[in-house]
Image (spheres, rainbow, N blue to C red):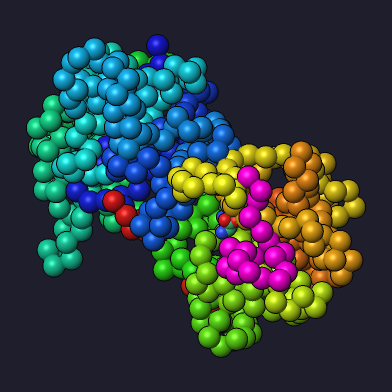
Amino acid sequence: MPKHIFVTGGVVSALGKGIASASIGYLLESRGLSVTLQKCDPYLNVDPGTMSPFQHGEVFVTDDGAETDLDLGHYERFVGKQLSQDNNVTAGQIYEAVISKERRGDYLGGTVQVIPHVTNEIKERISKVAEDGGVDVLITEIGGTVGDIESLPFLEAIRQMRLDRGKENVLFIHLTLVPYIKTAGELKTKPTQHSVRALRDIGIQPDILVCRTERPLTDDLKRKIALFCNVEMGEVIDARDVPSIYEVPLRFHEDGLDEIVLEKLNIKTGPADLSRMEAVVERVTSPSREVSIAICGKYIDLQDSYKSITEAFAHAGVENDARVNLVWVDVEEIERAKDASGALEGCHGVLVPGGFGERGIEGKIESAGYARREAVPYFGICLGLHCAVIEFARNACGLTTAHSTEFDPDTAYPVIDLLPEQKSVVNMGGTMRLGGYDCHVVEGTKAHEIYGENEVRERHRHRYEYNNEFRSTLESSGLVSSGIHVDADLVEIVEITDHPWFVCCQFHPEFRSRPGVAHPLFREFVKAALAHKSGEEPGSSGHRSDGADGPLEHAAGSKVDGRARG
Ligand code: GLN
């Protein structure tokens, strides 16, 4: 029977429950267990696909085409398993399923209630992932904070699961905050006590407390928390702030978290092999070079919107022995100035990421133009490909009014146009071209050199696409089509040969990048930016940095905190 670990959170949101859950997954996997993770989100949206990135941060796309919470990105980056749509359950999905069963008459005249109908639906979804996945352990994170009205049915469901399956098979881990109060010069345990009490009120006694803290938890504090929260001292884990999220599992291990989880679940394994993460952490924390990359997007105030991109740069930095400083550029400013040189000066590479909507679009197009003209490495992802194609059509092919029909439906040169199957779509939720599709990489191109493979599979999330009607015009002016989804003859990668590094993809490679195994496109883009910085041709090895860099807004490889949502 698969074992279950439930992770809940208390006191405040943004404690890093997703990273904590992923770290526990990594630790168990490093002991040879097969592990998967699942997130239960208490909101009523069916999935986060229709939510603004300002509200919810990035939408992480699974290979099977589900639009999911960004925590699934952390899970995939920390453990080896590929996740699917079943790994993200929302209250919206639960209620939708219960109500359609009721309409079908499945409840045989019964009164449909939160307990047992909603809770049973939740329990079924949790069991399904554990059993279908054939894993040893399923870690299920319950979104939100204990005390929220919306999460109550989920907490009730997991309370029942412990009764159904027994203590040896179900473990409760509660993540709390132990704040440092400056005026008192002390760490305070009261919020943790209150949060555990709130959990006990609904029938859940946590087995292990993971305490987020700015300062080390002393034994005295651990003893106090243990006493008031009805656990043993060894069951109170010190989760102090660390410079890199990839250090979190190492910190947990130091404090004995994996040992205690295994003991409580009565699982015997060999010792943990943490070498992969140790190597990553060593290189994240002390790189010998640095480079600045401009991210030209419109969600720059909430960097959670670009979580996987930020992490992919951290991975690429590790493999290039470089700190990648991400410079968040406001594209509306470029648009107003009609010039990108001021904003992008001092950056060694330019990335235009995915995005939706017209605001700032001319600023993004100009960023691509600046990179093309100035021979600065350029990486376009999804909308970033659209912008580069539009810019190239306007300024290298003379199609001066070229545009995407997303922004100008009546343009004379629709170089980016709605996919045929998108033309009849009415509902917004879950209807884009989503998930993994095969891409043939054309031999002799830069993309082929980067991938070193003829066939790759990458994840998508878009409605608009390179318009094949303009392919010969664009190609004859030097925009090479280097990746093709053969079945539907869709251009998936374009590049400019007469440029040090100008590569754009219709898909989102950031979803497949992993610590220790950076995505080749990110790895090579960072390498090209380092070469640009030192004035070399990409491909030859760069010099050590003298440390005199441009603005250092944000180093890739986010800190544990920094989540700004509930
Ligand atoms: N808005 C564009 C589209 O729908 C690009 C989407 C994206 O960048 N993810 O095709």
Residue at image location 49% in from the left, 21% down from the top: 133
Of residue 219 and residue 184, the one placed in the foreground of this image is: 184
Residue 28 point in image, percent of width and height: 45, 28
Of residue 65 and residue 399, the one placed in the foreground of this image is: 399
User: Is residue 464 depicted above or below 72 in this figure?
Assistant: below
User: Is residue 405 depicted above or below 43 in this figure?
Assistant: below
Of residue 326 and residue 40, the one placed in the foreground of this image is: 40
Q: Which image quadrant for residue 541? A: bottom right
Residue 44 point in image, percent of width and height: 30, 42
Q: Can residue 475 be seen at all in this image of the molecule? A: yes
Magenta-drawn stretch contains 414: yes
Relative to 228, 518 lies left or right: right
Residue 404 point in image, percent of width and height: 64, 65
Residue 70 point in image, percent of width and height: 44, 47
- Image quarter where the N terminus lies is top left
Magenta-drawn stretch contains 515: no
User: Is residue 265 depicted above or below 459 in this figure?
Assistant: above
Residue at image location 66% in from the left, 43% down from the top: 458
Relative to 140, 553 lies left or right: right
Number of numbered callouts drawn: 0
User: Is residue 356 depicted above or below 442 in this figure?
Assistant: below
Tell me the quadrant of ligand 1.
bottom right
Residue at image location 18% in from the left, 16% down from the top: 110
Q: Can residue 123 be seen at all in this image of the molecule? A: no
Residue at image location 23% in from the left, 44% down from the top: 145
What span is colored magenta in the figure?
404-421
